[in-house]
Image (cartoon, rainbow, N blue to C red):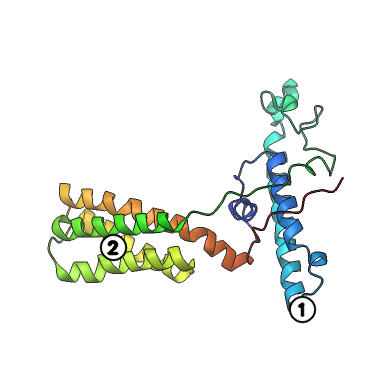
Amino acid sequence: MMTLAEAAALLEVAVDAHPEQVERAYRYQAQQSHPDRMTSASPAELAAAAARFDRFTQARALLRKADAERMRPSPADAQAGRPAASGASAAPGRNSADGSAWADPNWAADEPYEPAPPAGPWLFWVWTGLFGLAAAISYLGGPLPQSAADLWLRVVPLGLASVAFARTGRPVFLGGILVFGAATAVLTVLFASFGPLVTLQLLIAPVLGLVALGRPKQLRRRFGPVSTAPPPRPVG
């Protein structure tokens, strides 16, 4: 079952995106993955494209349903005759009577969706470098200062798992991050002092940064690749 967060990540929009943004994102992705566009594809490629197209359709429906639920007035508001949200009836792209999304299926034909470009490789090296710096500080002043066993059994595996997840998006590496991150938190609690607390804070930022880089790769591995080629411009 697709979650709301997965649907938003699949269409590359926010969880609470406006229906206009959802429709643009859906149309862009649907244009790229529709099986009818793959005239020379093999049966396996057509089946994969159809599966991706279905996932985009499911994501769009889920986000539209969530938006409709947000706009639905509560029982108290309904009895009092108040709208669901202030200014909802006047929001662009909604029906002025009930706050629903645009009914015209071609309203965004001249506004092709342009997804945000992926993070460049420089960001990966920045987070990796920051983790290396934090690991050195942790070795010198962490829960077990200047302990080779702590360095090789906790800090280095945590860094390797973070880097591997950022590069591949494989869930097994995310599991490693959780295990070694939990070990770091436990040691910090056991040896509660200024040094371990500082090193814990320094390690958290690059680890979360590398996890954020690996999350889109994990979704692509789960739902299939997403094309980023520019959509065709409408004719006429």
x then y, percent, for residue 22? 69, 45
Q: Is residue 135 left or right of residue 40?
A: left
Q: Between residue 232 and residue 37, name the one nearer to us.
A: 232
In the rendered structure, find residue 182 and report the number of the disc placed on it: none
Identify the residue at image location x=24%, y=56%. 133
Q: Give residue 17's position: percent from left, percent from top.
A: 64, 41
Residue 65 at what x, y percent from top left? Answer: 72, 45
Query: Is 145 located above or below residue 20 in the figure?
Result: below
Where does the image place residue 85, in percent across and percent down from the top left?
Answer: 67, 27
Count residues near mark 1 (Cα–Cα under 10 Å), then give few for <14, some for 14-19, many for 20+.
few
- The residue beneath circle 1 is 42
Which amino acid, mark 2? Ala
Asked if residue 179 is positioned above or below residue 60 in the image, the reply reads below
Quarter of the image where the C terminus is located = top right
Q: Is residue 62 above or below residue 97?
A: below
Q: Is residue 193 visible?
A: no
Front residue of this view, candidates 1 and 78: 1
Query: Residue 68 versus residue 199: which sits nearer the camera?
Result: 199
Task: Report the mark closest to the observer, 2 or 1.
Answer: 1
> Which residue type carries mark 1?
Ser
Mark nearer the N terminus (2 vs 1): 1
Would you say the residues marked 2 and 1 are in contact, meaning their CB atoms lie under 8 Å apart?
no
The quadrant of the image that shows the N terminus is bottom right
Residue situated furthest left in the rendering = 146
Label disc, if present, on residue 183 of the rendered structure: 2
User: Could you say which quadrant of the image residue 64 lies in?
Assistant: top right
In this image, 15 relative to 153: left or right? right
- Could you say whether the residue bearing mark 1 is in a helix, strand or loop? loop
